[in-house]
Amino acid sequence: MSTPVLDLHRVAYAYPGGHQALFGVDLHVHPGESVALLGPNGAGKTTLVLHLNGILTPGHGTVRVSGLDVTEENLLEVRRRVGIVFQDPDDQLFMPTVRDDVAFGPANLGLRGAELDARVAEALAAVDVADLADRAPHHLSFGQRRRVAIATVLAMRPEILVLDEPSSNLDPTSRRELSDILRTLGVTILMVTHDLPYAVELCERSVVLSEGTVVADGPTREVLADEALMTRHRLELPVGFSL
Amino acid sequence: MGSGHSAHLHVDGDTSLHRLPPHVKLVGLLVFVLAVVSVPNEARMVLGALLAMTVVVLLTTRVPPRHLLPRLAVETPFAVFAVVLPFVAVGPTVDVGPVSVSQAGLVAAAALLLKGTTGVVAAVAFAVTTEPRDLVRALQHLRVPDPLVTIASFMVRYVEVVADQLRRMRVARESRGFSARSVRAWPALGSSTGALFIRSYERGERVHLAMLSRGYRGRMPVTVPLGATAGQWALGLVPALVAVVASLAVRAG
């Protein structure tokens, strides 16, 4: 089997205040996969995501990204490989214009001039917002901001795209447009979400995290069809939705 | 309300002032204002001439007056202060019509008005021709310390986000029957302000995480270096040079 893009081995983490969020998480994501990370509020999903690019370092266990250990000296390369799109685009987009914001990541990697411009254009085109390059983020619609936020990470040519609640606060059309775009990107995806139909639509595999441990890992439809598991971990499909 | 101060200051255009590199304009503005302030208060003709020149520079931007006038209103408090000055200053008095006012106060008031208006007109000429992001780049180019540049840049970006949050909190308060009419409302306003501060602080932490995730290591990358030709420097510094010469001439004469 190929080297996993993400390889987490018995990752445990307790916050400085003493609250333990993760109790030995094992997770593998292979190139080309789209994986949904599901779980109730407070399950430790966000804490887990922050381990993927070394913002948090595990108290126990190891995190490897395409075979590279997440350590202090590898941080920049790890952050290039793992692109995290945070939930609130206003947190992600902090530069005065869309172009500057998309250029921020690749510029930190040392790109300049024509190469940087090409990278920015490529990322904006991938999420279909090339015409917004010179706009200010606060003048965009929420759906546009979400897409630009994805472009800011794509510009670093990541090996895996980690999306935190990509469909939240989107109107139905923006939500559908985003899924169309995500399908065309051709990049490995780990998607944290409460939107179970979205997981069914986009991810062939789902991992359920509950109280800091992985309680299920399998094909999305099978995981979501397991009613006992779903009820136990406060997950439910919307009324009227059938698998 | 509260929306778009940063967005509405700049007006697109293609005049020579628009085309000048932002750091040239910024240096020109700074030197010009310092020179104008250094002109002695008694040289009202010189100050008047400098004001006239600044107005001409502002007119070359071809920005419509209806857009400029509200921007100039920022001077109002200083103008009020200048008008009050002759009545409250002490010393020898002169009669102006039916009232007698302080002579020193009158001189100071006239100079304050002239210098203040000149400064505001010059700043508006800069602001309407310079995009906020270019101002940030100019500060960075002129070696202003990185934390200050980053703070300025984030203010440009987040002033509307915070204003929006404030607006939502006000609507939520009023939706529950709150009205800020008496002193008893102050504790509620105080805790709203506190909550806004906490939220902004937390947003700052989340923004920082997002920056780290994209490889930020304490320095904002310079993606498009600024440059200026000797001709651009010469053009940009003309008003500043005129003001410096005027100030020196008045002092010498």
Image (cartoon, coloured by chain):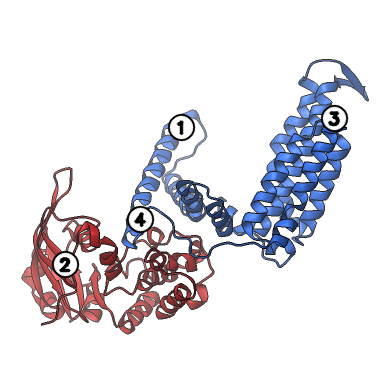
Disc 3 marks which amino acid?
A: Glu
Q: Identify the residue position indicated by label 3 in the image.
A: B42
* Foreground label between 2 and 1: 2
> Which of the labelled discs sits on residue B217, or is there none?
4
Do badges 2 and 4 share one subunit?
no
Instruction: Write down which chain is painted blue.
Output: B
Residue A65 visible in the shown view: yes
Mark 3, Cα crowd under 10 Å, few <14 / some 14-19 / many 20+, is few
The chain identifier of the residue carrying mark 1 reads B
Instruction: Give the structural element (helix, strand or loop) at label 3.
Output: loop
Disc 4 marks which amino acid?
A: Arg
Q: CA distance from mark 4 to mark 1?
A: 42 Å
* Foreground label between 3 and 1: 3
Please state the horizontal and vertical placement of residue B105, each as a whole percent of the image.
Answer: 80, 24
Disc 2 marks which amino acid?
A: Arg
Residue, x 82% and y 15% (percent of image)? B91
Above-or-below relation of A176 to B128:
below
The chain identifier of the residue carrying mark 3 reads B
Do badges 3 and 1 share one subunit?
yes
Q: Identify the residue position indicated by label 1 in the image.
A: B186
Q: Is residue A18 left or right of residue A77?
A: left
Instruction: Give the structural element (helix, strand or loop) at label 1.
Output: helix
